[in-house]
Amino acid sequence: MTDRLDPLLRFHPFTRLNGLLQGIEPGEKPILFSLGEPQQTPPAFIRPLLDRNLADWGRYPPTGGTPAFRAAAAAWLERRYGLPAGLLDPERHLLPTAGSRQALFLIALATVPEGTRAGGRPVVLMPNPFYHVYAGAAAAAGAEPVFLPATAANGFLPEIDAIPKEALARAAFAYVCSPANPQGAVADPDYLKRWIALGRKHGFAIGFDECYAEIYRRQAPPGALAAAAAIGEGLEGIVCFHSLSKRSGGAGLRSGFIAGDEKILRRVAQLVNYGGVAVPLPIIAASTALWQDEAHVAANRAAYNENFALARRLLGNRLVATEPAGGFFLWLDVGDGEAAARRLWAEAGLKVLPGGYMAQPGADGRNPGAAYIRVALVHDRAVTADGLTRMGRVLQSIALEAGGKARTAGAAPAIGG
Ligand SMILES: Cc1ncc(COP(=O)(O)O)c(C=O)c1O
């Protein structure tokens, strides 16, 4: 029997990583650079809010959260992106979500139509490599995922003009991720506007995954709501995803929101009412305060930036040739991501994700992530320094061996930035 959900096994990067490392003893005390889970704690000022609202733990949370939460999230969006007054009505254009993952999954169910589209299976467009939930959601919705290459050649953002016409005709939904996981590329306003125009022209909705929006090196990444405001035709067909997981180091809170097209938000809310979870009220109260505070976010950002400075110093400019503009991942070209992941674990106790596990082979049969490893710089300074020192050692010997082989074969070393 072929099962629509088979791809869920195939696409799950961490299941594959566990398989790859099974039976291999870590060479040193393990450090997990594989999972994008911030290791900071959320700021202590939320503690009294969780306690004060103790009775609310006994209540089923309303899917829409509270007016105070919706107002705080909308006010944050307006401040952060300089949105014009009146673009967002917090009562219609905003929905709290249990982190962004659940909503990223449900939105495919909310937007992919039943039956055919332009005579074929509906399509969900997504970058390649991609956050695995996009592909899992497309599969669960019965859509065909179409993977758009996001490689060094195009600045790690899919080329809009290169999307096959036939895929555009069948497209029901598209995921756009900026800052991108895994490469940290940041889309400019023009790029975001071009996606919005494309979606409107071909009648498909777009989910802009902006959950890394607050983790950036120098400039705050632009957002799709501002791009929509610049176009001036409202929010139809666009939904933005935000989360406290990365911004506030609060992955365990499971708290985020989506903002945009009210018709799509209503459909997602319906799905949550059936098979999702709404955000508990004490967490809604804490989240309201977190969206109102920037000091802890600036401190988090500074800590990530220190980790990137450490990476430059400890791995050298050859590996970290260009720092990603956003996010907290290093995306390192090591020649063979799987082989490097195995060696980093066996020789240094470092768990990293082979880039190929976040991607699918393209039309040319090549997996655009295969040469890479993804390293989540989510630890404190001391752990990061320890881990990156070990990593530098192992990658150096991989580079030397590759260089030796290449010299014998008369080619350039296989490792590079
Ligand atoms: C690109 C991207 N989107 C969404 C998420 C989901 O995060 P959360 O559900 O914690 O908001 C992640 C988590 O790693 C991610 O990398």
Image (cartoon, rainbow, N blue to C red):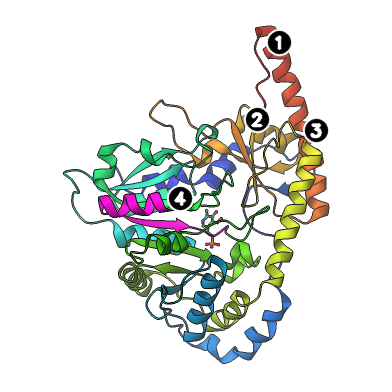
Observer-nearest of 201 and 145: 201
- Which callout, 1 or 3, points at the residue further toward the start of the chain? 3
- Which callout, 4 or 3, points at the residue further toward the start of the chain? 4
| Circles 2 and 4 in contact, beta carbons < 8 Å | no
Q: Position of residue 90 (x, y in %)?
A: 43, 79
Q: Check disc 4 and report the residue beneath it.
A: 190
The residue lying at 39 percent from left, 44 percent from top is 7
Q: Check disc 2 and report the residue beneath it.
A: 334
Cα distance between the residues tagged 1 and 2? 17 Å
Q: Check disc 1 and report the residue beneath it.
A: 407
Residue 40 seen: no
Magenta range is: 193-212
- Is label 2 or label 4 in front? 4
Cα distance between the residues tagged 3 and 2? 13 Å
Residue type, label 2: Val
**How many numbered marks are there?**
4
Residue type, label 1: Arg
Q: Position of residue 195 (x, y in %)?
A: 38, 50
